[in-house]
Image: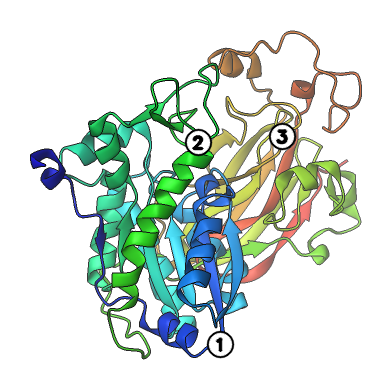
Amino acid sequence: MLRAAALPPEFSARDGLPNARAKALAGGQVRVAFLGGSITAANGWRVHTLEILRGVFPKAAFTEIYAAVSGTGSNYGAARLQRDVLRHKPDLLFVEFAVNDSGQRTDAIAAQMEGIVRQTWAASPGTDICFVYTLTINMLERIKAGEYPPSAAAMEKVAAHYCIPSVQFGVEVARRDEAGTLVFHAPSSVKADAAGNDAQGRLIFTRDKTHPTDAGHRIYAATLKRTLPPILETGRPGPHAIAAPLTADNWQRAQLVTIPDSAATAQAASAWRKLAPRDTVAAQAGSMAPPIWVAFTPGATAEFRFKGTRIGLIGLKGADNGKFRCFIDGQPVATDTLFDSFSTPGRHPLKPWFFQNMLSDSEHTVRIELLAEKINKAAIMKKAGVNVADPTPDAVTSAGAGTSAYDGHVLYLCGFLIVGEPVAAPVLTAPAP
């Protein structure tokens, strides 16, 4: 009992979810959005939450707005919020980024999450918001010590400032772990029974230290089932007032600028190609991907003018990624690649990239160029225990059938990510002949 008392609060009701509750009690249609990463993308706590809401409000019609993108955090979430969530006019928004934001600075997390809140209420003052905090094995001891992990703690500052309710899923996980009724991680070689328990009767929470099993997701859902009623009973319906900014550099102006068809001139066709929605690579990117362009000739560029303080891009990572250079106002500022140790053949998930430095809030020109310089992919993959020396036939990638997927050297580009406003539409070009 003493240890349980030391655990951090499982939830904070704050101003509750009064607008969603009022609409549900009236038997209306309630649109519920889920903005998050792979833990939200899974058919787990998200699906269970809708079931819980339907049970609490049987007369209401709940509609899901699916807005989960695996492997991405609140920076990309803030940039894609209008496209993926707000245009669908949600009544209730759940935000889940504590795990994917765990590698970021806490001040950056707060600025990004604040941007999500301020964008939402500027567009729809009646939309209720709830933050939920998932966890990895690296966060468990912090929760047992009675503290929120750094990413969740940064989000709590935003939640407290705007009186947004929040739920810490990790408290129940920590409680069961301490009681010996749960094991946080067990490899796939450890068999589980129909209830998701190991031979000792302990619930197996994850197989990879991050993503809950079906049984693990049921723990998350049980936490929501227990905490949602007091949250829903709190507060009075009405528009949410936007408080003074918590951080001056918050991401309220964040947005995603996609590549229009008009960006590609006849000259650009020799170096760029737009993927059809049914293209295999496009299908691998998933339903949340914006239109995808691929640069396949070194020297191909994408140029964009904007006014603002932050710049990045959204593309696809894959075994066939090449290296690119970023120029801002004519100066080379970064050389990078979307390729990483998880870039395996047959997978092309979305991946954001941001220039780390803040810019002056003025007009800028950014240019992204595909370089001829090759990446030492074998060395990168070796760290992940993957040998790429052997040919890996994969007709899906730019390398072509019968060749190694890692031989490809392209840039998949879906658009630019900014905190600011576009000045002109992006333009694609090919290298001079």
Write down the residue under mark 1: 28
Badge 3 amino acid: Arg
Secondary element at image label 2? loop
- Left/right placement of residue 314 relative to residue 186 reads right
Instruction: Say which quarter of the image contains residue 89.
Output: bottom right
- Could you tell which of marks 3 and 2 lies nearer the N-terminus? 2
Q: Which percent across, then down, holds residue 81?
A: 54, 66
Marks 3/2 in contact by CB < 8 Å: the verdict is no
Judge whether residue 250 can be spotted in this image.
no
Front-lying residue, 81 or 235: 235
Location of the N terminus by quadrant is top left
CA distance separating discs 3 and 2: 31 Å
Front-lying residue, 108 or 264: 108
CA distance separating discs 1 and 2: 36 Å
Write down the residue under mark 3: 347
Write down the residue under mark 2: 195
Instruction: Say which quarter of the image contains residue 170.
Output: top left
Instruction: Say which quarter of the image contains residue 417.
Output: bottom right
